[in-house]
Image (cartoon, rainbow, N blue to C red):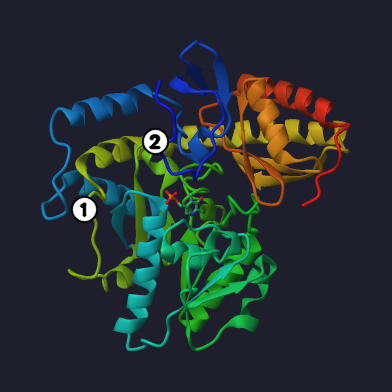
Amino acid sequence: MATGDHLYDCYKPPAQEFVRGEGAYLYTEDGDKYLDFIAGIAVNGLGHAHPELVQAVKDQSEKLWHLSNMFRIQGQYELAEKYCNYLGWPGKVFFTNSGAEAVECAMKTARRYHYDMGDPERYEIITFTGAFHGRTFGTINAGGNPKYLKGFGPAIPGFTHLPFEELSNLEDHLSDKTAAVMFEPVQGEGGLRPVDIDTLIKVRNQCTENGMLLIYDEVQCGAGRTGKLFAHEWAEGKADPDIMAAAKGIGGGFPLGACIAREEVAKVMVPGTHGSTYGGNPMAMAVGNKAFDLLSDEDFLANVVKTSNFLKQQFEGLKDEFPDVVDELRGKGLLIGMRLKKAALDIRKNALSKGLLCGSAGDNVLRMAPPLIINENHVREAIAVLRECFEEARNLPDFEG
Ligand SMILES: *Cc1c(COP(=O)(O)O)cnc(C)c1O
């Protein structure tokens, strides 16, 4: 058996090795079964080995894998049309392979827009503490997390980082250099903090009044995670973005991202301004189209809301039962978790040893992003494991930052 010695040591995976998945479960070579409540970090929204996604990959793989964007890719035309029709405003899409690339495209589009409008000095992008926008040079500088920037040279200028709470006081921080405001409608890595609807609407209006662009990073909170295809839809059309980055769940496990922008903004990105070899290749489009059809289904999304309400109710029960372990509930929909008083990483490890996969996030948060196909029985199974873990954590020392 090969070891990981010849890999970069950027990750430290546990001993369990999963070789197969089905629905909400993962299996090791020995057949041990685990309940997956993190779904590859909010990626496998449709569960593992969804038969319709499997079929889409099989069918496409026998026809055509890759062409490059030098040639027409009908699957891109279809999927872009689906997304824009769904969102209900005139838009254009650029397909990428990842979330970071979708964010890069969003930031380039925003700057180029002001440049083309005769305002090249308007390049500043405002972001917020706890943000996560990816791991490329551009996106670590956008996110501004010192841990991710350390050792990677001088900070790239053109970003203003504000405390998360200042989202509701944006007026104090604008200048004639401000090009765009970018944030996650529900922060993922930063600790599952949702932005409330009133703030979304306020920021939208401020952007419109001041000629700034509103960029949503819906890489984690989109793709049906909160019970809407995109989290900002909870504002019912009152806080639509100018540009949005999506990825993770929209490919159901196949690498796929998208930058979706208003037509009048997107049209500045003319031939020569941007590109990608793989972005939106026929394989990704086959899966992306099928995933869109399944994720955007009204009954499917209604079920996400129902299951997430049940999960939240169960979490509230745990919080009441273990006030010495659970500090605060966090998140929205099936991007949900709790800030703990005991070390979240230890509890996550213990849960894994009992057959439950969870994640963690900034702020000592135990993070869950289960496949969106889960039902109440899966929730009960997860809660039973968490209850055992919390019971065992009760007597541990409190977490100290
Ligand atoms: C994961 C994530 C990214 C980066 O996506 P990659 O596919 O890892 O490049 C960007 N923004 C948010 C909100 C994310 O959660």
Precedes in sequence: disc 2 or disc 1: 2
Measure the C-alpha gap from mark 2 to mark 1: 19 Å
Residue 240 seen in the current view: no
Q: Mark 2 is on which residue type?
A: Gly
Q: Which mark is residue 253?
A: 2
Can you give x and y, in whole percent of width and height, for residue 220 in the image? 50, 48
Q: Give neighbour class at mark 2: few <14, some 14-19, many 20+ (Cα, 10 Å).
A: many
Residue 363 seen in the current view: yes
Is 22 above or below relative to 333?
A: above
User: Would you identify the image quadrant in which residue 345 lies?
Assistant: top right
| Front position in the image: 196 or 46 | 46
Tell whether 280 sits left or right of 125: left
How many marks the image carries: the answer is 2
Can you give x and y, in whole percent of width and height, for residue 361 in the image? 63, 47
The residue beneath circle 1 is 277
Can you give x and y, in whole percent of width and height, for residue 225 in the image? 53, 42
Can you give x and y, in whole percent of width and height, for residue 20 in the image? 43, 19
Tell whether 9 sits left or right of 80: right
Q: Mark 1 is on which residue type?
A: Thr
Residue that appears at 10% across and 52% down: 71
Q: Nearer the viewer, mark 2 or mark 1?
A: 1
